[in-house]
Amino acid sequence: MLEATVQQSVDRERIFEGYRRWGYLAANLDPLGFLKPIQHPELILDGADATAAQSFYCRTIGAEFVHIDDPVRRRWIAERLESQWPQPDRAFILDRLIRADLFEQVLQARYLGSKRFSLEGVTALIPLLDRILSAAAEAGGEQIVLGMSHRGRLNVMAHIAGQEAADIFAGFEDVDPRSVLGSGDVKYHVGATGQYRTQNGRKLDVHLASNPSHLEAVDPVAIGRARAKQARIGNGSLTKVVSIVLHGDAAFAGQGVTAETLNMAEIGAYSVGGTVHVIVNNLLGFTTTPPQLHSTRFAAALAKRQAIPIFHVNGEDPDAVVRVGQIALDYRHTFGSDVVVDLIGYRRHGHSEVDDPTITQPLLYAKIKDHPQLWQIYAQRIGVEATANVEAVRTELEAAHKTASAMKKKPKLRKLPSYWSPYKRGRYDSAYEVDTGCTAAELGNLTDLLTRYPPDFAIHPKVKKLLEQRSEMGHGKRPIDYGMAEALAFGSLLLSGTPVRFTGQDTRRGTFNQRHAALIDTRNENQYVPLEHLQPSQARCEIYNSTLSEAAVLGYEYGYSRDYPEALVLWEAQFGDFANGAQIIIDQFISSGEDKWDLPSGVVLLLPHGFEGQGPEHSSARIERYLQLAAEDNIQVCQPSTAAQYFQLLRRQAMRHWRKPLVVFTPKSMLRHPDASSPLEDFQRPRFEWVVPDREVSSAQRILICSGKIGHELRNERKRRGDTETAILFIEQLYTLPKKELRAEIARHPDAREIVWVQEEPANMGALSYALPRIRHYVPEIPVRSVKRSASASPATGSAKAHELEQKTLLTLAFTTGPA
Ligand SMILES: Cc1ncc(C[n+]2csc(CCOP(=O)(O)OP(=O)(O)O)c2C)c(N)n1
């Protein structure tokens, strides 16, 4: 008897193990039945009774979780799936479904032919989010940061982000076009801030991040914003601020930034205590079907490379959907982990409402045509007559439409949090400038704090020497190099209460062995970051090595900067050209976010740049691209030529109350070069110099204008030639080009007969096509020509010797009087 019981229990466990692993394949997940359940061979258990396991794993929830190696987490999930759940508040769910579906229908009727990217087919998203937000609030949540794309966005704004339907409808009226000529964004991209009220009266602030068309690009931005909000709160913040990111199925599977973002979830530099991901899965991407969109059965499979559970759920079983929402939030809170909900439904209309989907999916849409709305299915299932409710909601929405059509001004759907109040955005004003220099005493004291470490710390001999040198630098005994200048900038800001957050690949040591922000004990690899131990009252310092990503990491830091204007937030590319891996973030958020969404940021990009014979890659940070993006004071583009200028620039960025992204081209070989190092006095100068004047030549015949490293080479060449008639000016701020300062410097050489723009980049790159016409325009009385490498498809030669030859030729040409 006992034996039989043991055997039964072993059999049961074997059956359950099979279903925990493969049950999701056999689950009923697609409301329209195109995604056929699969009987995995390991589920065919020769005659054994699997009814119980099937009921848990093969109905309308299909869970993938046995790839999680932690048995505690697996057991936690199994326990929740293998138990009976109380019936949810069905009247509430029905009401929400009616509202979600009718919202779309009224828009369809009133604004026929407008794109809105209807949620119909996956309207269970609204009760799903209701449950996730309510569970978050019940656990002590205060704020939700929501990232999402077009699909159902307006619906989410109305039902989750606390926006009035009338205010959303007003977006379709497109009133007051003159106020947004050349700026603003379409209604399904702009963000919203509002309040969500749970059924039992709790309130959550909801921040729906503004979003470009570029799918998934907002993911890291939203999560970075959540991290900044958590950092502002401190203790308990992981529960108080929750990030939720909604994805399309095609985009989740196809866009690399999704993988990059998921990869950051468990890393100290980026963790937010777990993000709830929801795939709003309509089993279509525009006109393309799943077998063409991903190499996996489910779009969600990407998440399985990590210990992230995936809950697939049939979008036409709202009770199951709500249950999954609760499990997902609880899991996030219990384990501080990401979690994926794959909400499977369909798309009632075309990709947008102006598309005819019957051309590409005639069978699917023939079926959809006769398929009832979800609220109808649900009302029938729970035995409720909903007609009166539907009419009441319709009347409400029609009234909202009427209100919207009478509006004269487009309402603002979002406002900046109060911590933005002290900060300015928009156009530059010289009144924003502040003095950024430090006294010798301040620099000396700070140097002592930056170069100390615990007495029992076994420091690497090379680092010890570096710190000794830095000590001499900070006390005026040797010129200060970039590494020390940067440490002094960060340290001085931290002491005055400005937090510093800085990430990038190998940033703690520095790609060029120049930073050594973290000292490493040679006996045990313990780390000590002097910038974190300046004094107890200092601000928070975070310097992290990032993952090997550009898009997600830069997106994250941009997001962080959006919610921490008081902090200096920096991202460093390993080499400047790698920033093109984050081009979407640069184009769609950093350079245009303020114009489109009126959202400022003070994020800093550090991009190592300079032609040094290292080949086509690693030479150019593509100065030309940032200058092409620049307009309306949207960004600042700078190339400081000395350590002190770098120091002043970083301090200026934090100390001015004007928040504007800053792109800095930073040196590589010049990092420790004496020509680019600065005496202590230059750190005491009041401000960053937009143009570095020639302090050696007073009345020149010729003026060379350049930016960055080439200027130092030109100076050396001038010295070699014993030339006393050529002045060399460095433009340190390329955008906005300092017209007044430049003209003033040129005017100091009244005999100048020629101006030469000199750059090491090829003619189709660098600042040439930006700077040359402007200089000509500013100084029409003097002919201006240029010296540069020939236009080239790739930035630089692969041969170090060819580079030397080219560089020599450039210098020779720069000192040869020639035709304009
Ligand atoms: C990076 C990027 N590439 C292409 C597009 C064009 N596009 C817009 S929506 C869409 C299909 C998206 O499908 P899915 O992610 O499943 O979301 P759905 O629209 O079905 O909700 C495409 C290809 C885009 N917006 N972003």
Image (tube, rainbow, N blue to C red):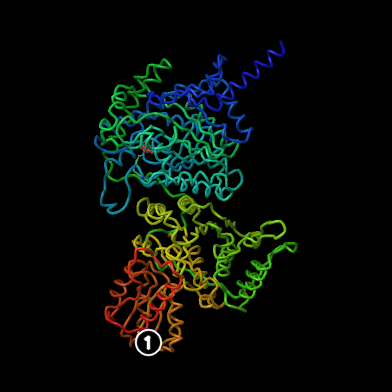
Q: Nearer the viewer, residue 107 or 774?
A: 774
Residue in view at x 36 percent, y 75 percent: 740
Res 749 seen here: yes
Q: Nearer the viewer, residue 716 or 532?
A: 716
Seen in the picture, residue 682 relative to 73 is either above or below; the reply is: below
Q: Is residue 159 left or right of residue 184?
A: right
Seen in the picture, residue 170 relative to 597 is either above or below; the reply is: above
Q: Which residue is mark 1?
A: 700
Residue 110 location, quadrant: top left
* x and y, in percent, of residue 771 in the image: 33, 71
* x and y, in percent, of residue 424 in the image: 43, 59
Residue found at the far top of this picture: 1
Quarter of the figure with the N terminus: top right
* x and y, in percent, of residue 307 in the image: 56, 38
For ligand 1, the image quadrant comes to: top left
Residue 717 location, quadrant: bottom left
Q: Is residue 242 left or right of residue 526?
A: left
Tell me if mark 1 has few (under 14), some (14-19) or many (20+) residues whose alpha carbon lies within 10 angstroms of its own: many
- Residue kind at label 1, given as amino acid type: Ala
* x and y, in percent, of residue 680 in the image: 57, 77
Q: Decide if ligand 1 comes within 8 Å of the CB at mark 1.
A: no
